Image (spheres, rainbow, N blue to C red):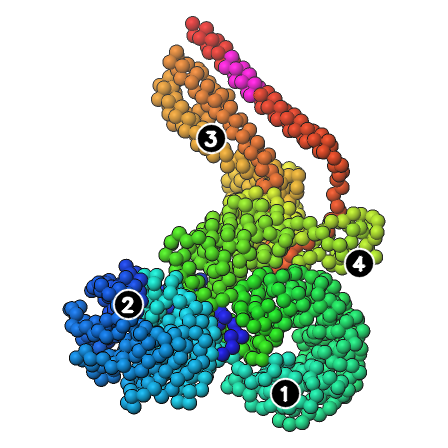
Amino acid sequence: MSENGLKSLGTFLLQRDKVPKVQEDIASNLDELFSNPGCLSYVAELKKAILHIERLSPKEITTPFKGNCLEISESGKYFIFGSIEGRIAVVDKDNKEIIQDIFLEGGSVYSIAIYKGDKYFVSAGRDGIIRKFDFKTFEPVQSFVGHEKEINKLAISADEEEIFSASDDCTVRSWDKAGNNKILYSHEKAVLSMDRSKDGSILVSGGSDKKVKFFNLIKGEVVTVLNEFTSSVWAVKISDNLKFFAAGDSNAVLKVWDYESMTLVKTLDGHTKRISHLEFNHIETILVSSSNDSTIRIWSVIEDKDEIILTGHTDWVKAFKISTDQKSIYSIAENYKIMTWHFPVFDNSCRKKQHSAIIRFMCYSRTQNALYTADSKEIKVWDIKTRSVTKTFNLTHELSALCVNSDGQSLIAAYTNLEIHFWNVDDVVSQVKLKHPSVVKIIAASQDHSLLVVGDANFRVTIYNKKTFDCLQVYRRHNSVVNALSFGKPDDGENKMLISGGADNLIFIYRLRTNRSVKFAGHTAPVTAVGVSRNNDLLISGDESGSFKIWHIRKEVCIKTLYNHTERITGIYFNENSKYFWISSMDCSLSLWNSTSFAEVTHFCSKASISMLCFTQGEKDIITVENDELHFLPTILGGNKFAIYGPGREYYSFMKYLLHICEGNELPHDPTMDKWMIAPFEFNALHFYAYFNLPVHLKQALDCNSPFYFSKSAYSPLQIAIQRNFRDCINVIMKNIRIKVQEDPYSVGYLEDSIIKLNEIGFRGLDEFYNAIFFSTYDKLLPKFCDERVKLPIVIQARSLGPQAKDFFNEEDITNVGTALTFIQSALKVDVIIGSRGSISFLESLVCSPNTEIFKTQFIRELVLYKWKYVKWFLIPQACLYCIYMLVLSYFLIFQDGEYNTTTVTILFILNVMLTSYELFQMALTRSMYLQDVWNYIDMARIILCFLYIALVWDNYDESICKQVLVSVTFASMLRGISYFRLFDDTRYMINLLSEVFNDMISFLILLTYSTYSFALIYFIMVNNLGTPQTFSYYVSQAYLLNLGDFSVDGYGAFEWLIFFFASVINPLIMLNLLISIMGDTYSRVKTEQEIADMKELTEMVIEGEYLLFCRRSQGKKTYLQICQEEAVTNPIAGPDEKITKIKTRVKNIQELMNNTFDESKNELRDAVEGLNSKMDEMTTLIEQISLTQE
């Protein structure tokens, strides 16, 4: 059997014809998980994946001996094995403990056989003696002596009356219960393997003489001899119902025959060393083999499939057994391990070989769900459901091109005789429709049923009307053979775009409506395949060297070039959900890529080159052409079946690796494990690294460019780390993206849905990330100068990366002289639509971010200023209305002395109603956010007081009360008016300083209140008896006036003067200087953080303005921010001397700045000390004067 298939698609599905109830529950839970969107959770998915991996992973039993042979008791509870060291042991399968162990002096034990009912067992080995033991007591019962050399294999007759043995003495013997032996037949050399048919009629053996002999036990004679091996035959097996026979030799050749006819059915290549043991399953559809290459392989006998490889042993696998229920495989090897394997099940992949020559063409009809393949002699029609050929068309001429007609009912074939034929699937003979001037190399029909396009050997692309076959257009843009054609996806039911790729390394895009063509150059080898995304935005082209390029069609630029393949690209396919695309190559691989970040997700390897690729309807199957075979593969995306896929068949190694990760074992990072994917969850190892907080593994994986992508439920490793708040993992991922952002800006796409959460976390390095994603673009196609009359900078929102001149300028604005330009772009898409829900959420996350350094970054500044440019016009009207309100209030107070005037009060009422309406509107939009702004509380107080005053004056209430309320209204109005100075750049800083001073004064005010209250209490006790008694509140006011330097010392004695001294020193002097110190610190801090505070305040105002645009909540759209600005002119430094001079100048400036700062601080300190000394001198003089007065 040929192995021209993908290695990786031997998957492990849990659903079989008869599965245990536990497995049925797992499968049903898996279906439920993906059928209910509300249940989707990365935690649930990861736990499901781990559960499946644990069930599918082999269970190990470690033994103290190197295993040689293995049997399992009829009860299924015990393993009995023989070892190289000459020991026989019994292991409890469930407890994993050795319960019996005996040592045989005869040396290594090669074979063991158990009697029915687990009553006895026999063993044989190096010393050539057969020993019979009681299974329960392990006591020897009988010995059989007769062979001259070691015995390699034992078998017990069906009636258990005889024992059969095969030996190095070239004989196969039978032994009766009395110990008598009889030579049944002989080989020319040592007999290495033997098996008895289940019905007990046939004995088969293989030997060093390279022969396989069949001995009929009923007739007593050798009935068949096979001489089809070139080396010693080490394993033979007859299937239970005598349907198949299999044998393997020391050269790892494994063959399967039909037993009845003795015709060779399959030759199975895969093992690399001697075949050691063989077993068929009960229903004779699967053959299991073991080998000295440390693997066990499962082969399909009925269908042509890739084998499934069980890896886990690290030494020769000597023997294995299949459990009675056919659900497990038990194996023993020389690595001191007995392993229990879940019996894997084949997926629905298969190979079909119906062509006698290499397949040259393949195409698929979605409407008919039929596949068409062709070689040089015939075309075959395949039924996809049965995967069988339903019809064959013989060709009279050699085909040069083939495609399916857009109606799906017929084929369009081009021949080397220049004729183009239409084949109806139901017809036997094709119809000649037209004759092309030269040999057609590629042909395609448009999906709108109107056009037929051919690329020929004369370098032309010709467009025909498919109905009339009239030539509509001929493009002669290529200067070599046209190799690839593809239509863009229909727009409004019409194909408007055609793409061609040629051997001249060029790609052309033809706009069919305007007959305009655009050249894409950049390939260094002939273009061999092209494919267009489903939204017609992206074009992927592959070439002969294996590289492929991703182009942005609208911008006509190459986005990225990838070199992961090493040979010709043969197929390109975009998934229906546009999340992924596939690339096939002649380097024997098929790769899967993320279509957003253009990162490789995984890739599969085949043993033969993949020359063509297609997908069936609904993407249920992947079909590849490999030489003369078709390989049908199940798609790994979109299903609900558990499976593991990757760049090989080491899935057991992958599962073991993940289990070590899950168990917290210290396991070094293995980059080969990162490219495996777990379906249907679409997880890879990086998701597990993030979930289990392994930043070192994540870093190494990202350094190796391991696949980083979203799972099926849209969780990337970054989002998992964010959800679990693993800061180290977050930092590792963000640092990697930041370092590679200019090289690979599309990798930032993974952050679009996480950036708000990242802002809220405020991890270290967030500011560095924002600096990294906003960078200058060096594109030769961008203009270098523009007309001096153009107003710069120009800020735009772009749907895709890479600034385009036409987005910024008209053609007449671009000049060869004038204003020098530089273009800056962001690699992160954010919602810039003012008033949208996404925009507000992003800005709120900035304000809440613990890392305030982000407000210094150019990206955040430009974004906020861009929004402020428009938002301020929604806030200025309110400020103007408030200004009018303040003018009317001032007029009322100054010119009308606050006396009741009907007109003025009515105007105040109307203005207050308008301002109140605005506040209520804002409150309704912002909800709880409204209560987080202290200015809103002041405004609410002002509104209430204003309405209260108006109500009082209209009601002719007590004038004194009205005046007090008016004073309160005036104070609240003046205080609220301060907030509107935030609208202006020059005063915004001062408002922030005022706010910070107030916040920092809170602790000072507490101390001042406490000391004032204390001295008020002292004065109440001390001075109250010196004159007319006063209330306690009087002394509180006196203590407060003392703080301001207003005091009375009438009637003070010496003790009272002493108390007065302490009170006047502590409150007026110490507290005042403390206040000055606090305000100085506040000023220094605010001055240092002025840029941050100013931008943060501006962001808050932008949020306030965006909340007003409630009609745009659902209009959010993520775009890139791009800026064109005047290039900063710098003087280039010619040599090292100038660099040193510049450094010296900078150091000198820094030194001068430090000296100036030091001098200023020293002067401030000196002034403060002098001021304190002056105050002390004044106090001392005052005390002396008081003392003299009393004397």
Residue labelled with disc 2? 126
**Quick check: is 629 in the magenta stretch?**
no
Residue labelled with disc 4? 810
Q: Residues within 10 Å of mark 2 (few under 14, many from 20)?
A: many
Vertical arrangement, residue 705 with respect to residue 358, above or below: above
- Check residue 322 in the rendering and tell me which mark sits there, or answer none: none
C-beta proximity under 8 Å, tags 1 and 2? no
Residue 262 point in image, percent of width and height: 42, 87
Earlier sequence position, callout 2 versus callout 4: 2
Instruction: Say whether residue 126 is left or right of residue 924.
Output: left
Q: The residue under label 3 is which amino acid type?
A: Phe
Q: Residue at x 61, y 80 (%)?
A: 358
Q: Nearer the viewer, mark 1 or mark 4?
A: 1
- Check residue 1004 in the rendering and tell me which mark sits there, or answer none: 3
C-beta proximity under 8 Å, tags 1 and 4? no
Q: Residues within 10 Å of mark 4 (few under 14, many from 20)?
A: few
**Quadrant, the C terminus:** top left
Q: Residues within 10 Å of mark 3 (few under 14, many from 20)?
A: some
Residue labelled with disc 1? 378
Q: The residue under label 2 is which amino acid type?
A: Arg
